[in-house]
Structures are given as C-alpha cells and as structure tokens.
Image (tube, grey):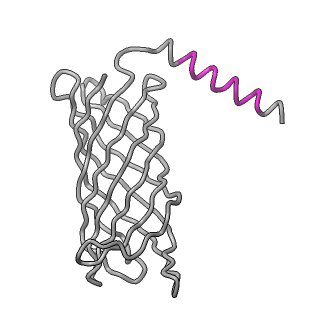
Amino acid sequence: MKTQWLIITLFFALILINAQAQDNGSRWSFELNGGAGFPMQELGGTELETGLNLEATLHYRLLQHTGLYAGWGWAHFAGNDQLDYEETGYVMGLTFEHPFPQSAIRYYLRAGALYNHLEVEDNSGEIIGDTGHGWGVQAAAGVNIPIGGKWSLTPGVKFHALNRDLDTGATVTGLNLRYLSARVGIRKDF
C-alpha cells in the first residue's frame, strides 16, 4: 500500500513540476455557456421536449494542453405529462485543448463527472419531487475561437447522463436523463 501511495505522489509531483516549466500564458479562465438540450430517451416514461441548459465553469490549465474544470450547471425540460424537470448540480473534469495547425482556433475535448439532482415541478413551479444528488457523467467537444484580448467564443456539443431514483413515498421511479446539447459559450482567460 505504501508503494502505491509513493508512486501516486511521485506521479502528481512530476505533473506539477512539468506544469510550472510549461507556463506559456493564462492558467485560469472562466466560461459561461448554454444551449438547447435534446433528450435521447424518455425520462421515467415521460417524453421530454427540447430543453435549455446553462453552465458556468472555472478552468485551470495544469499542462500546456491539459487542465481541470469545475462549476455549476442547470437544465430544464418540459414533459408531456404537464410537469417540468429541472436538473441542477456540480460539474468537474479534465479538459484537453490543442490548436489547429497554423491557426489561433483551438479544439477542446472534455470528460467529467456531475454531482446533480433532478426536481419535478408542477405548472405553478411547486417542487413535487426531488431525487437528491448523485453522480453522473458528461463529455464535450468543441472549438475555442479568439475574439479579441483574452476573450473567446466556445461553441460545442455535450453528452450528459444522470441516473437517479425519484421516491414519492408510494412509488420509486427510475429517472435516467440523457441528452445531447448544442451550446455556445463565452470565455475569459486570466
């Protein structure tokens, strides 16, 4: 066990040493993005309409092309059962960003985890069910297009998956939210 911890510690020490040696610009950035969410399946027997989602993330570049991100997200979908479904919670993960050859435009790939919950609301906005928080996954890809100074546009696509159980006391319904999102964001490097 001590050997495993020693190897892990050395691995992260090498990453941090390398990160300091490759500092070639801004390490921190903030991104605000949103777009349409296209459900990939029914949610607990309910057909969902196209939804809306927003996400705010803080990015930290560890290496020249690799970094971490963490933030908060929200998504809203109306169901054919006259109820609204809202997902909120936290996102975190790894990002890889690399320039296209001979271009200022960079592509990005992200893979991460979510810690989110689903709320079910009636027509008046009253919460009638809450799944509690649990883990899910997300993956995203897109481009980072500089627009001046340290600002850029970040259009892309995101896959999002969260499985939670809704316990109403009388029944337990499995809610498996899966959607693709076409989104655009704005990013500021610091």
Q: Is residue 140 above or below residue 64?
A: below
Q: Assess whether residue 11 is covered by the magenta stretch.
A: yes
Q: Quadrant of the N terminus?
A: top right
Residue extending farthest to the top is: 21
Q: Assess whether residue 151 is covered by the magenta stretch.
A: no
Residue at 28%, 69% in the rendered image? 77
Q: Is 66 or 189 nearer to us in this picture?
A: 189
Residue at 30%, 43% in the rendered image? 142
Q: Position of residue 59 (x, y in %)?
A: 39, 33
Q: Position of residue 74 (x, y in %)?
A: 33, 56
Figure label count: 0
Residue at 35%, 72% in the rendered image? 127
Q: Is residue 62 above or below residue 55?
A: above
Snapshot quadrant of residue 46: bottom left
The magenta stretch spans which residues?
5-18
> Relative to 108, is 166 on the left or the right?
right
Residue extending farthest to the left is: 148
Residue at 46%, 46% in the rendered image? 111
Q: Position of residue 67 (x, y in %)?
A: 45, 31
